[in-house]
Amino acid sequence: MAVKIITVSRQFGSGGRTIGKRVAEELGFDYYDREIIDHVAGETGFSRDYVAANSEYAPGKSIFSYSFEAAGTPGVMNGMTTADYLYSVQRRKIIEAAESGKPCVIVGRCADYILKEFDGVFNVFIYADVEWRAKRIVEVYGDTDVKPIKRITDKDKKRAANYRHYTDREWGRAQNYDLCLNTGFLGIDRCVDMIKDIALNK
């Protein structure tokens, strides 16, 4: 079956966003990443920065952080917590993109799970060793007061907790994806080419 949708899940600093954007541009697919943030911000009234910081990250580093949020935060709509509200809005946007019939690349946000019943979906996970990623985030995002490896560890734990909470699956587990690529070993250009080749020749 032809590939119509490519989902790209990624470790922080692995280059997954760069790869997803390049694949979309070179295949002529629509691209959804920050576009989803803009949509969610517009629909919910939350600031773009708030949505970016919370739309694919758990409130804390473990799945239990959702329990703490639920206990301490009143529902913002129909009894939902803020996290659940954000998830529901971005989930609708992801499904809307898939149902449009236009080929697309979607980065992160549990899209691989949300679209598991759709045909023509190709799920990719991008990863690399922590030292390679630490060097890359300084090059791409610059230095901060927080050491690069701690930034990586914190982001990955929050992404993993978010994914587990909404999918009941383990983030980064190979069985959840069709292809897992190590950018530190393969390089970003080769990863782009491999994804394109599979998408075009599936």
Image (tube, helix red, strand yellow):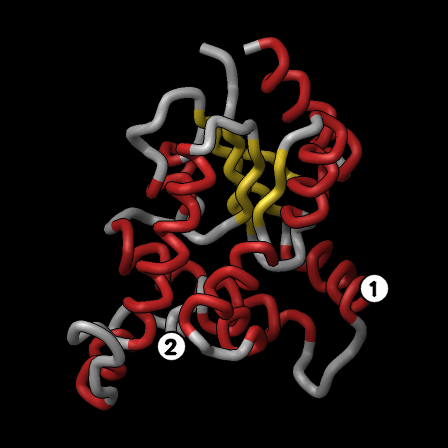
Horizontal side of 84 relative to 162 (left or right) equals left
Q: Position of residue 48 (x, y in %)?
A: 56, 73
Horizontal side of 109 relative to 117 (left or right) equals right
Q: Are marks 2 and 1 in contact (CB under 8 Å)?
A: no
Q: Position of residue 65 (x, y in %)?
A: 29, 77
Q: Position of residue 34 (x, y in %)?
A: 60, 58
**Residue 21 placement: quadrant:** top right
Q: Earlier in the sequence, mark 2 or mark 1?
A: 2
Query: Please, is residue 81 above or below residue 115 in the view?
Result: below
Q: Residues within 10 Å of mark 1 (few under 14, many from 20)?
A: few
Horizontal side of 180 relative to 136 (left or right) equals left
> Please, which residue is most extreme toward the bottom here?
72
Residue name at image x 46 percent, y 78 percent: 46
Tell me the quadrant of the picture where the C terminus can be found.
Answer: top right
Look at the image and tell me whether residue 157 can be seen: no
Residue name at image x 73 percent, y 25 percent: 193
Q: CA distance from mark 2 to mark 1?
A: 27 Å
**Mark identifier at residue 59:** 2
Is label 1 in a helix, a strand or a loop? helix
Residue name at image x 69 percent, y 41 percent: 19
Q: Which residue is mark 1?
A: 139
Residue type, mark 2 in image: Pro
Is label 2 in a helix, a strand or a loop? loop
Residue type, mark 1 in image: Glu
